[in-house]
Image (tube, grey):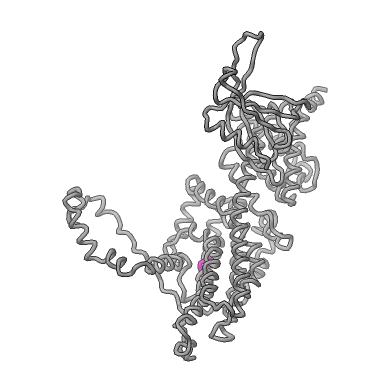
Amino acid sequence: MAQCDHREENQSSLCSSGDILANLHSYFGNPHLVNNLVSHILTTETREQLPSLEAEDSGSHDETSDPMNQLDNGSSCTDTSSAVRSVALTHMWRFGKMLSVAKLFSAPRLDEDVSSLSLLDEDKTAEGEGKEDEKQELRISFQSKYIQIVPLYQDYCLQEVKRGVHRLDKTFLSELISPEFVQGLHSRLSPFLPAEATSSPSRLPEVALSSPPPQPLRVTPCTLWHDLDEVKASGLLDRLTPKEIRLQESMFELISSEASYLRSLGVAVDHFYASKTLKRTLPQMEHHILFSNIRHVRAASEKFLMDLEIRLGECVLISQVGDIVLQHGPEFHKLYVPYVTNMMYQEALVNQLLQQNRDFVYSLKRLESDPVCQRQNLKSFLVLPFQRITRIKLLLENILKLTEPDCDSVPNVEKAKEAVHEIAADCDKGVRKMKQIEELVYLEMLLDFGKVKSVPLVVSERFLVHQGPVRQLTLEGTYNSRPSFVSVYLHLFNDLLIISLKRDQRFIVMDHTVFPTHVRIEHLKTEVLSLPPESFLLHLSHSRTGHPTAMILVTNTKADKETWMKLLSSTQ
């Protein structure tokens, strides 16, 4: 009987938690992803903090008692949801774990035909059977003609920065960086510098002498179109105009830079991802978060480069490349958007591992010291796809500038540029969306609806607009009683307004309503009413009681008042 009463008292909380899962399922359309999320929470947090779950887990290991299997079978989710909420209620939703959990949302939005990229499928193939078969499917029998003579993509990018600098006023720039200028500048500044700054190298502090000398920036020349033996033998350099040669160089740069990119991706996959030593230092989930779908990105790059080199092999005078970019655009979109969306979590995880996982740090340093990395660290390899998609857009823009307007290839180049721009824009949109979702999930765990009817927070297209504390004016007792103020907290979303009391790190919900339909604000004559100048009136045409209500709110500053009034009066 007591157990039934307890269930009735917590019915609202359980339903609310169930709503969380239901809306996550609805939003992502991927139940396996959400189930994996909840199971991850259970295994990393709840089993440490909830004795009842621990007892259940230790008492039986059959399929019906395993939370993972319960989720996969679609059985009762209220117990699991309650466990998730219990984690938040006991303040165990730590930043690191919240970050790790939020990372799981970076894999959705993929089409069904790439379901092999999902977390669940990654876990299945990571240590088990079929791994070699999958590896073979990702590789194609193609050997680039240029991959061994181009630098790593990090060096290629550095070279482009250097080339951009040289496009400035060369005379002025060469004067600035010449040894004579630097020496003359140093001598002119000597009277104003400390003695140790102008001393000879033999008088430098001992700590400087014991430190290793800084490594010079290393830039490896990248092959140019006019340097190709086939081009020299064809006699094209004597027949083409300088602009036509520059166009060929621009189109060939797409090929050579893709070879450079593929070379660096090879290091990322074959050296870092495939390292068994590094993999043993990480849970499988973190290993997948760290490398995301980089193997599939490498496979797509191989196919793209193969088609580009086939085009060059057909005729050394490249006709166009825009059609090839267009052909591979859908695959790039499918792979790059989730990868770039996951990048902010990649970096956060790397930083966390460098601080907390000694075995990972040791293994990583050994891998990074290998000559194949050419002194580049793991982070520089993980950021490659983002750098590449933005670089392709720049290359296409340059090709378009050098192509005659009436040329038959112009439409394809323009379409390809727009397609790549769309990929970059969707990457940016994905990152923003992930931040919004992470924020909603986090807030969902902090809100306590208590006796107020709960509303699911993680809903498609919802995002937090503004939040902050205000004071609510209250009157006690008789007409002559002095007004008092109660601190309340507002969470304004694009479609919802929540008013709550903040207790420690929790928010006890007092009221909520649909925004902007049921929200209206009104200016007050504060001087006449003897109210603080930062006061305004908030009307709710439909509150939790079902009746209209109004409250006088006071912000901390005039600027806060203007902000809240502007946002609350918005009609979207």
Q: Is residue 246 above or below residue 511?
A: below
Chief secondary structure of the magenta portion: helix
Measured from the top left, where is residue 98 in percent x and y?
60, 42
Residue range of the region highlighted in magenta in the rendering: 262-266
Whether residue 235 is situated above or below residue 392 in the rendered picture: below
Between 392 and 476, the residue placed more toward the observer is 476
Going by the image, does 210 lie left or right of 85? left
Figure quadrant of residue 311: bottom right
Q: For the N terminus, which image quadrant?
A: top right
User: Does the magenta-highlighted stretch encompass residue 265?
Assistant: yes
Q: Is residue 483 left or right of residue 208?
A: right
Foreground residue among 286 and 22: 22
User: Residue at the location (62% across, 68% down)?
Assistant: 300
The extreme right residue here reads: 1
Query: Is residue 115 or residue 280 the one in the foreground?
Result: 115
Left or right, 237 with reference to 275: left
In percent of width and height, residue 181 lies at 23, 63
Residue 56 appearing in the image: no
